[in-house]
Image (cartoon, rainbow, N blue to C red):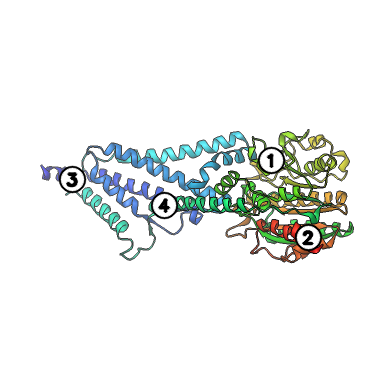
């Protein structure tokens, strides 16, 4: 019987062997694709040991009891791993870090809304559908190829011998990785990915415990310190979206952005104001601006959603409390917040304005709900004008958010802005994001122009509305995505501090800030979480009482 099977298999060996080798190729390509995000492509590797192991096992088990369900399970696992690889590529591309399942599952909805806002809801659904279809096709191909293997492969046949060699080679490579010499261009992508995610999950668990304990200690000790040295001063913070040091130091963007910094310096000098600039590190890249805002306000390094969620479970003192203790009215304008944002109340601002609270009568511009000039105008004409006391305010300036189209001009006559209806003249003008994003070089140009617009509007506001009792802080929230920055960018963002009183800037000069609009360097040891401490040290209750 055995000889009959062998003879029969040898007469038709090309069929089953070809299917076996085709299965090996599909599995190998699919598993090597798990490394796409690490290498910005397939990289130098050519063989995945797991592909050898699985192909050999299926070749020997073909037609036996339970192999159908095993094939189904393997196809499901392979599809799941490929989905993880796609998510990993997206995380590295947009956030400049690997995927962490312990942190990033909650960001799926945010990614969808970001794509929908930048391009369109239809495009977001289409992209999601195409990704699902591609994954299902891969899983289906694996399952179909396994099921198309012959009912039984004789161990003594050529096909059986090849399957046995593949199985033994895969087992030897996987089990003997630490004992045998490592073969060039041979890797274990599935095992590596699973190990990575296990590492991140464990690290996240430890981070939860450590950070939670630190928050409890900090909450018990209290960090509030009334900034009485700024009692008569309006302190205004403008967070400029995607304004990182790449916009200033990268030769692709500097010719567009640096002239705006020179103009900011010129306007400040003409208005009798002093200006210093520096660099601080942001906790995130490419997105998750709320983590940068939280780091700035709390003085804590909030570099993950886990830390953010743990933070919101406690009652921590923030800059809002510091200014409230000094008698300031506190306000925040968040024109990008279009969905319920209950955590915004956690900070305790006296006035909290989201997109729906701002009476903007103009059109949205793709993801940008309203241009920065309207945000500045409404702040000045309503929030600041009606503030019952000196003001501490934080504004989110979002015109430099992707997709960076259209780029609006700065309206010289601020009195004409009103409810924003004046911006209707630019509704539907210019090219669409879908058209722009076909050319990455032009996308980068529009990024620089959008940052220049935000800086120009902010300089115009400073020139017209800053008085002797105003301290203005302009700061980037984070670097843009890797497509803009390139690989291995600095985490730095520029900070510009402007005041009519040069003495108010000394605390920042002590931290390496320099006179003028140009930051001294794109790399720094300091972070935006340090700024709260600098303000407390320079203007806090203890310093004021000592000087008195």
Q: Which residue is mark 2?
A: 545
Q: Nearer the viewer, mark 3 or mark 1?
A: 1
Q: Nearer the viewer, mark 2 or mark 3?
A: 2
Q: Which residue is mark 4?
A: 32
Viewer-nearest residue: 172 or 119: 172
Nearer-N-terminus badge (3/4)? 4
Give the crowd class for mark 3: few <14, some 14-19, many >=20 residues within 10 Å: many
Q: CA distance from mark 3 to mark 4?
A: 30 Å
Q: CA distance from mark 2 to mark 3?
A: 90 Å
Q: Nearer the viewer, mark 1 or mark 4?
A: 1
Do callouts 4 and 2 mark residues in contact (Cβ within 8 Å)?
no
Give the crowd class for mark 4: few <14, some 14-19, many >=20 residues within 10 Å: many
Nearer-N-terminus badge (1/4)? 4
Q: Secondary structure at mark 3?
A: loop
Q: Which residue is mark 3?
A: 154
Nearer-N-terminus badge (2/3)? 3
Q: Nearer the viewer, mark 3 or mark 4?
A: 4
In this rendering, would 510 be left or right of 479? right
Q: CA distance from mark 1 to mark 4?
A: 39 Å
Q: CA distance from mark 3 to mark 1?
A: 65 Å
Instruction: Tell me which corner region of the image, top left, top right, bottom left or bottom right, holds residue 360.
Output: top right
């Amino acid at each position: 019987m055995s000889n009959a099977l062998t003879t029969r298999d040898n007469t038709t060996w090309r069929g089953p062997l070809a299917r076996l080798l085709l299965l090996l190729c599909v599995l190998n390509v699919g598993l090597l694709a798990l490394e796409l995000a690490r290498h910005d492509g397939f990289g130098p590797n050519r063989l995945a040991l797991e592909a050898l192991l699985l192909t050999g096992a299926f070749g020997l088990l073909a037609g036996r009891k339970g192999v159908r369900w095993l094939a189904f399970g393997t196809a499901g696992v392979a599809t799941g791993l490929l989905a993880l690889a796609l998510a990993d590529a997206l995380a590295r591309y947009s956030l400049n870090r690997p995927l962490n399942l312990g942190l990033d599952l909650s960001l799926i909805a945010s990614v969808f809304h970001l794509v929908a806002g930048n391009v369109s809801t239809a495009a977001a659904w289409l992209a999601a559908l195409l990704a699902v279809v591609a994954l299902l096709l891969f899983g289906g191909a694996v399952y179909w190829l396994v099921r198309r293997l012959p009912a039984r492969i004789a161990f003594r046949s050529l096909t059986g011998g090849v399957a046995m060699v593949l199985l033994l080679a895969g087992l030897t490579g996987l089990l003997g990785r630490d004992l045998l010499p490592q073969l060039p261009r041979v890797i274990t992508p599935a095992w590596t990915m699973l190990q990575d995610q296990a590492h991140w999950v464990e690290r996240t668990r430890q981070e939860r415990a450590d950070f939670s304990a630190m928050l409890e200690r900090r909450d018990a000790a209290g960090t509030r310190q009334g900034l009485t040295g700024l009692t008569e001063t309006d302190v205004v913070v403008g967070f400029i979206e995607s304004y990182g040091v790449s916009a200033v130091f990268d030769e692709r963007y500097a010719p567009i952005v640096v002239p705006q910094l020179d103009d900011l310096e010129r306007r400040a000098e003409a208005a009798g104001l002093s200006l210093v600039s520096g660099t601080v590190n942001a906790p995130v890249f490419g997105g998750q601006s709320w983590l940068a805002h939280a780091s700035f306000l709390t003085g804590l390094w909030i570099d993950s959603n886990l830390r953010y969620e743990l933070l919101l479970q406690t009652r921590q003192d923030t800059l809002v409390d510091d200014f409230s203790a000094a008698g300031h009215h506190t306000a925040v304008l968040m024109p990008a917040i279009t969905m319920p944002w209950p955590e915004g109340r956690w900070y305790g601002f006296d006035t909290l304005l989201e997109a729906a609270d701002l009476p903007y009568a103009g059109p949205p511009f793709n993801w940008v709900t309203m241009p920065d000039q309207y945000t500045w105008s409404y702040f000045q004409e309503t929030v600041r004008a009606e503030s019952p006391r000196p003001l501490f305010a934080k504004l989110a300036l979002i015109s430099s958010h992707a997709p960076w189209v259209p780029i609006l001009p700065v309206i010289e006559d601020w009195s004409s802005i009103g409810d924003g209806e004046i911006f209707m003249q630019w509704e539907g003008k210019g090219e669409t994001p879908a058209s722009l994003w076909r050319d990455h070089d032009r996308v980068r140009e529009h990024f620089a122009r959008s940052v220049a617009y935000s800086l120009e509007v902010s300089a115009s506001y400073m020139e017209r509305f800053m008085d002797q009792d105003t301290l203005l802080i302009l700061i980037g929230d984070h670097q843009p995505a890797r497509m803009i920055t390139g690989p291995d960018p600095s985490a730095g963002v520029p900070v510009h501090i402007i005041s009519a009183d040069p003495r108010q800037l000394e605390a920042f000069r002590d931290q390496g800030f320099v006179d003028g609009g140009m930051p001294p360097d794109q790399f720094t040891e300091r972070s935006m979480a340090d700024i709260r401490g600098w303000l407390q040290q320079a203007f806090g209750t203890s310093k004021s009482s000592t000087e008195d």
